Amino acid sequence: MLLTELVTTHAALAATRSRLRKRELLADALRRVADGTEAAQGADEVEIVASYLSGRLRQRRTGVGWRSLTDLPPAATEPTLTPVEVDRAFGAMAALTGAGSHVARSGALAALLARATSDEQRFLRGLVLGELRQGALDSLLLDAIAAAADVPPKVVRRAAMFSAPSGPVARSALTGGVGALEDFRLQVGRPVRPMLASSAPDVAAALTRFDGAEVAADVKLDGIRVQVHVAGDEVAVFTRSLDDITERLPEVVSLARDLDVRAAVLDGEALALDDAGRPRPFQETAARTGTHDVGSGAPSVPLSVRFFDVLHLDGTDLLDAPAHERLAALDRVAPPAAVVPRVVTADPGTVQQFFDDTVGAGHEGLVVKALDAPYDAGRRGAAWVKIKPRHTLDLVVLGVERGSGRREGWLSNIHLGARDPSGGFVMLGKTFKGMTDETLAWQTERFRELAVNDDGWVVTVRPEQVVEIAFDGVQRSTRYPGGVALRFARVIRYRDDKTADEADTLDAVLALRT
């Protein structure tokens, strides 16, 4: 397959809002690459093409930034590049380190772009900068993989639980069918996509979803989601986005090694607590988990871990076990101090009192869970429902304005976007409220790194940074494309533990409209 074929597919995806049509376009591209390549490179090419169709490079970091893509070389007149050649080129760039690596990377990038036509150059630029927002979100790509390989969608989705990128799933589906997909399973040491919670505005609304059944209500901690894998003395700690942060959390590693288990996979939250057990500011937790080197001594801000689920224990996978069995297993192997506080009850008054006490203790709220539900990895379903004492949304920063007056010299007013399920982001408004001087300094540096355009007032940024926004309500508005605006929006925190694809959707915002 030539790269130009993906460019054409991308244009068609961007031109339609129909999910069915998008799926057909994606599936057709996957079939063509599977049918039209030699076996020697076909499997690799399927994985590469699937990644590019989702708008991502396979390389997590390449060292190539937007400044490197401002001055492009003269374009080629005829398309000759293949996705495999592009992948190899970026792989080589990502591997460059040390003195002279910047010059070598710039030369390699220029050589690659010189072989690309003008349309291909624009496609590659968008691919590197994460701007290919044509609606090919992961769930849609998984459906297309199932259609292209003629396998049941549920088998593809099951396999995707155990693979962070979808490229390997496409490769297995199109080259090995159901049998190859069934080889995807939980492996201790390899992260699993985390189960996610839906939202409810209050305790009463949350409990109506469980029809009076007994539920587990867990304290919702204001920390970093961690998945801890234990195999003998080997411990690995992964974030919500499946990044390995083992070396940054020695306290978690030490506790995990003390557990009386041969092998385990535990789901939990790491956070900084004060001497009274109340959560310290989230920024302190984020600073610790974002630091690569905690030094040889004790960390300046110690972290605690609290587990709320177990996915594997001593050779037995528990993903399909009902929650009450998983919780019982967790209580057997983890010390009480390392388990998220929980009540199990069917009484609304008990849950409400637990919610009030939890919020009074400084925590975020509760997550109410069905006791008969399996661990639905990678999905946001009805089995887990989170409750917070305020309206909050996780939105994506689309742009930021230069500050004035006391904020002159900083990037201040951020443009907020909700995820459009059919692709891209829809602006809901702006805010400069809730920002401390420390926040302003951090976001000024962060958004300069993400900048793709600067007209002297508004800096347009790559839609990657998630921010948690509190607000008093949603009102109709003709000012913004989504037809709504947030009332009294203010910044709670920046969410480095979430990707833009996990931001709240426009539909979720519209459901709150007054």
Image (cartoon, helix red, strand yellow):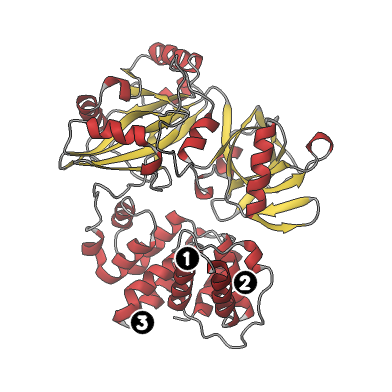
- Residue occupying image coordinates x 36% and y 82%: 37
Tell me if label 2 and label 3 are in contact, CB under 8 Å. Answer: no
Residue 161 at what x, y percent from top left? 32, 50
Helix, strand or loop at disc 2?
helix
Circles 2 and 1 in contact, beta carbons < 8 Å: no
Quadrant of the image containing the N terminus:
bottom left
User: Whole-Å distance between the Cαs marked 2 and 3?
Assistant: 25 Å
> Left of 350 or right of it: where is 39?
left
In the rendered structure, the answer to whether residue 417 lies left or right of residue 289 reads right
Residue farthest toward the right in the current orientation of the protein: 405
> Of discs 2 and 1, which sits in the foreground?
1
Q: Which mark is residue 37?
A: 3
Q: Position of residue 327 (x, y in %)?
A: 25, 28
Does residue 460 appear to the left or right of 185 in the view shown?
Answer: right
User: Mark 1 highlights which residue?
Assistant: 94
Marks 3/1: CA distance?
A: 26 Å
Q: Position of residue 319 (x, y in %)?
A: 25, 41
Residue 353 quadrant: top left
Callout 1: few (<14), some (14-19), or many (20+) C-alpha neighbours within 10 Å?
Answer: some
What's the residue type where badge 3 is placed? Answer: Thr
- What's the amino acid at mark 1? Ala
